[in-house]
Each structure stands twice: as structure tokens, then as C-alpha cells.
Amino acid sequence: MHEAAHKPERRFSALAVSRGIGIGRVVFLHGEKRQFFRVDLNEHQVGTEIDRFWAAVEQSVGQLHELATNNGPDLHNDVSSIFGVHLLIIEESSLVEKIKTVINDKKVNAEWAIKVVADQYLEKQLAVADGRFREKHLDIEDVAERLMTALGGSPSKAEPAYSGAVVVARELRPSAIIELAKSNPAALITERGGWTSHTSILAREFKLPMASGIRNLSKLFGHGDHVIVDGIQGEVIRNPRIETVEHFRGIRQHNSTVGSPPLAGEKALATIDGAQIAIRVNVDLPDGYTYARTLGARGIGLFRSESMIGNLGALPSEDEQFEVYRQIADAAGEDRVKIRTFDIGPNHFERRRSVEGNPSLGLRSIRLSLSETSDFRIQIRAILRAAVDKNIDIVLPMVSGISEIERSRSILDEERAKLEQTGIPTGYPKLGAMIEVPSAVMTAHEIAQKVDFLCLGTNDLVQYLLAVDRDNDAVAEWYQSLHPAVIRAISEVLAAAKSAAIPVAVCGEMAGSPFYVPVLIGLGVRELSMNVTSITQVRRLVSGITLADSVALIESIKTAETADQTEHLLREFYLENWNHLFPPGLLDSKHR
Ligand code: PEP
Ligand code: MG
């Protein structure tokens, strides 16, 4: 029997960010910039791992020699002496030897051994009051980072055992989720991340139960601990008793067998009293759309073009982009695809990483595109070329007023003229704006006059309207999609689109959550764009409600002064009238 079974059961409350129950053993994923797992090695793999580590040491020593002896004009003496110190740490301290011993004795991968040893140094030095010694830790961290980078060039041959495991990390990057999903872990636990973080969105997309917001994970959990992740109620249970495991297995089984209606076929979706609701999907891969269509999606409401950018932050070339846009447009066919131009911040580019202290308010999205227009022009050209005989539209992210639209349109016209002059054919995409910034809501009437359609990005709209970081679970309580200000903002935007007679779609996470959908429909939304995994549950709900009830519901929540009051009113109504239309347990959990 595993030793953890003797320890008492302990429960930690968490934020439920991806629904589902996961039961398994803990595997840690470490690293901020680079994420890695602990890999348990077989006896015969240890030697190869140590060779791999030595190669990384040699490479790092070579780099440091060069940096420490290069006293050219660009390198200040102080700087070269720091690298001298780093060289000494590798060559003369016991660091390298200790790491080797950990690989050998614990039979783990080199990355993990570096982390264990660096953490030991940190602990020792933090215990020392003297500031000079404390600072030395930064040097150790730097050296550890350099060794890790060198290891990155030769990935470990041993496979991390995270299939069926519960992956625990301080923070998970979207690219890590994509990698992880291939191995089918049981669940994910992170310290940071809110409901609308891209990481949480992807976890839901891959149907991986996920809980976030538990601090000091590495102190609370150990490698191999038996845990249950309740991504429905928001709880993590360490060392669960047999009865607890049985209970959660029951819930898991129930969830996987209830409420999956047959594939949607061709039938258009409408409420009982005939209000037609268009379901679109947020996808980044052509196959994803093909599948979503079988579930009833009609059109790609959001293609996040930054999904093409790899781990290292390099932008794809014009031809590479052209290929991707063509493929996604082919998959969408008559249904159309909305390509959102790069919605990235400076942290996608290592060279600008340290410049900005407040990236959500910084040089990102359309601002970045318009500040260095060369990358934007490449993207626009690729879209214009791909749009020939295809149904492609363009969406501009984080627009704050009409000027970004005017500037983007001029660039679009200029690039079209240039392409046509050289005999390259172009298509005519419609141009739309994401409405996700308060100033865009307040000028929605003006914006609506300048574009062909609007997309309501509620993830960011809530973040910017309520001044609450969507990625920070510490303020999750303040991230309130039902805040009266959010409801009014959505209403304003719908009115603006109506008076300009242009379509508007909601493409944030609210569109895929059955709890919010009746509110959106009652407010007047007729286009919802969501993740593939939400389609079936939203279709089921929409086809079982009436527009009349949804409108009445809006009337009843108008008196609510807080998100909590609104939530309460909605839950009461749902429980009484539509309980059967909601996935099991959904009405039990919190939905601000
Ligand atoms: C949004 O902000 O609601 C949105 C759809 O875009 P993203 O989640 O990519 O910011
Ligand atoms: Mg957004």
C-alpha cells in the first residue's frame, strides 16, 4: 500500500476553472519560463541522463568563459566579473556535484535535480540574515537557469509519467496545456489562473478537470500523493479515504453518462418560441471546426491567430500564415471564419520582456500591431491573399475607439493596392472590432458605423470594466460577469449594433456557459461563439427555453444591485423552471 494512504484526508478549497472530476497521483511541473516535469528514471537510464547533464555543464562553461573574458566596448567590467562568479559557481562549488548525486541517487531527470539543489541553496540562504548572502541566491538561480537552457537543447529521452496523473504547477502556460493534453492527465492544479485565463479556456477545451488558486502547492503536495480534483465545486482532496474516492467516482461516472444528446445534424437552433440562435465556435484548427460542425456549429466566430505563434515567440512568415488561413477558411467554407489579428503582448517577445510592468494595459493587441506596422502588414497581406474566393473576415482586438479602426483600414487598403499593383489577387474580408474595453462600449455607436460587425469579448470586457485581472485568482471574487455594469455594457453594445444594423456576436466564455446564456438571449444576443466542448450543452439549453421567459428574466434582474443578487435570482428561476436543462451540478456552483 502507498504510504500516503496512512495519512489523514485533507481538503483544500479552490477555484473550479474546468469542470470534471480527476483522481490520480501528483506529478509536478516546474519552471516559470520553461516548464518541466519530474521524470522517474529506470536504472539503465541514469547514466545517459548524467551524460546529458555533463554536456549541459560543458556548454554553459563555454558560454561563461566567453562572457567573462569578453571585455569589449559593450561589456562593462562589472558585468564580466558577474559571469566570472557564475563560472566559479559551476567550476569550483559543489553545485554540479550535488546535482549529479541527486540524479544518481533519486533516479530523476537533470532538470528536476537542478531544481531540487537550487531550492536547497535558496532555503539555506534565506535563513541567513545578511543581505549579501541572500543576493548570492540570484547568482545560483542564474546558473541553474543557464544549465536548464543548455538541457533544453537535448530533451530527456525518458518519458514523464503524467498520463492519468494529476499535474501540479504554480502556473501553466497555454502551450504546456497543449503538450500535456496529448498524454491525457487526470486533472490539473495550479496556484494561479482565473476562469477566463487562456490556460483555463484550453483546459475546458481538452476536457481536463482543473482547480486553481491554492497557494504553496509544493509545500502542500508531494510527488506521488493521491489526490482528487473536484473541478465542479472547486476542491482538492489530498489522501482521500476509500469512501471519498468511491463518492467522487460515482459523480464522475454520472457526469460522463448524463445529458449527451445525439449529434445536432442540420437542424437550425431556436428557442421553443422560435428565436433563432446561431452557434459559432472558437477554434484554431481546421479539424476542430469539422468536428464542431457535426455538433451544430455554423461558422468560426473566433480564430485566435496568435495560436500560430510557437513557444519561442517567433511570428510565422506571410506564406506560412497564408497557408494556415487558407486551410481554416477551407474548413469553414460557406460558414465563414473570423480571423482575429494578433492579440499578443510584449511578453511574447523575449527582447521586450522586461520593459512593461503592466502588460494588460500596455503595448499589446491592436496597439502593438499599429506601433510596429511591419508585422501587422504581413498579417494583413496574408489574410487578403487567403481571402480570394474564401469567406474570411478580420477582427481587430482591444480596440479602444474609432481611430484604431481607421488606421487599420488604411493599412488594409494600402496593402491591397500594393498587392494588386504586383498582380497578386486579393479578397474582400469584412472588418469587425472586438468590444472588450470600456471606452469601446461607450463609443460603440461610433464604432458600429465604421465596421461590418462587432464581437463582444466578455473575458476582457469584465476584466477592464471592473479593473480585475482575469488571470489572477486572488481577485476571482471580483471577476463578476453578472455585475450590473457588465449587463448594462452588453446592452449598450447590442443597441449600438442594432441601430447600425450590423451583426454582433458574443465570443467570450459567457457565451459557452449555460448559466449566462439565457441572460444573453434575453438581452438580445442571437449569435454565440464558444469552445467546442460547450456546444452540446448550450444547444440543449437553448432548445428548451423560451425567448419570452429570457426577456422576463432580464426584467426581474434589473432590480438587482449586485452580481450576487443577480446570481441568486437566476438560480432560483433556473431551479424552478429549467433544472433539467443544466449539466449536473452546474447550478450548485458559484457563477458570478
Ligand atoms: C475575450 O476577451 O472575451 C475574448 C474572446 O478573447 P480572449 O479570451 O482571447 O482575450
Ligand atoms: Mg480578449
Image: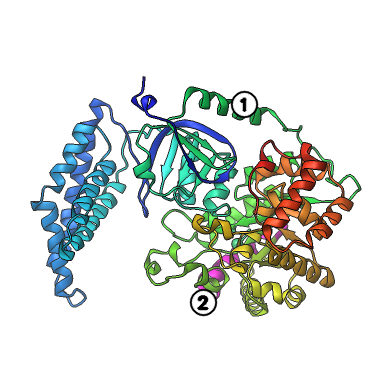
- Three-letter amino acid code at the position of disc 1: Gln
Q: In this view, does 345 lie to the left or right of 109?
A: right
| Quarter of the image with the C terminus in it | bottom right
Q: Which of marks 2 and 1 is in front?
A: 1
**Near-viewer residue (294 or 442):** 442
Up-down relation of residue 478 to residue 449 (above or below): above
Up-down relation of residue 428 to residue 556 (above or below): below
Q: Which residue does the numbered mark 1 point to in the structure image?
A: 253
- The residue at the point 37 percent across, 69 percent down is 354
The answer to whether residue 390 shows anywhere in this view is no
Q: In this view, does 362 lie to the left or right of 144?
A: right
Q: Looking at this rendering, what residue extends furthest in the right direction?
A: 273
Please provide percent x and percent y for residue 150: 26, 50
Q: Give the range drawn in magenta.
A: 370-392
The answer to whether residue 473 shows anywhere in this view is yes
Give the Cα separation between the discs numbered 2 and 1: 52 Å
Query: In the structure shown, which secondary structural element does the residue marked by tag 1 occupy?
Result: helix
**Near-viewer residue (464 or 10):** 10
Q: In which quarter of the image is residue 496?
A: bottom right
Please provide percent x and percent y for residue 166: 45, 36
Please provide percent x and percent y for residue 221: 37, 39
Does the magenta run of residues contain 353? Answer: no
Does the magenta run of residues contain 386? Answer: yes
Query: In the structure shown, which secondary structural element does the residue marked by tag 2 occupy?
Result: helix
Q: Which residue does the numbered mark 2 point to in the structure image?
A: 371
- Three-letter amino acid code at the position of disc 2: Ser
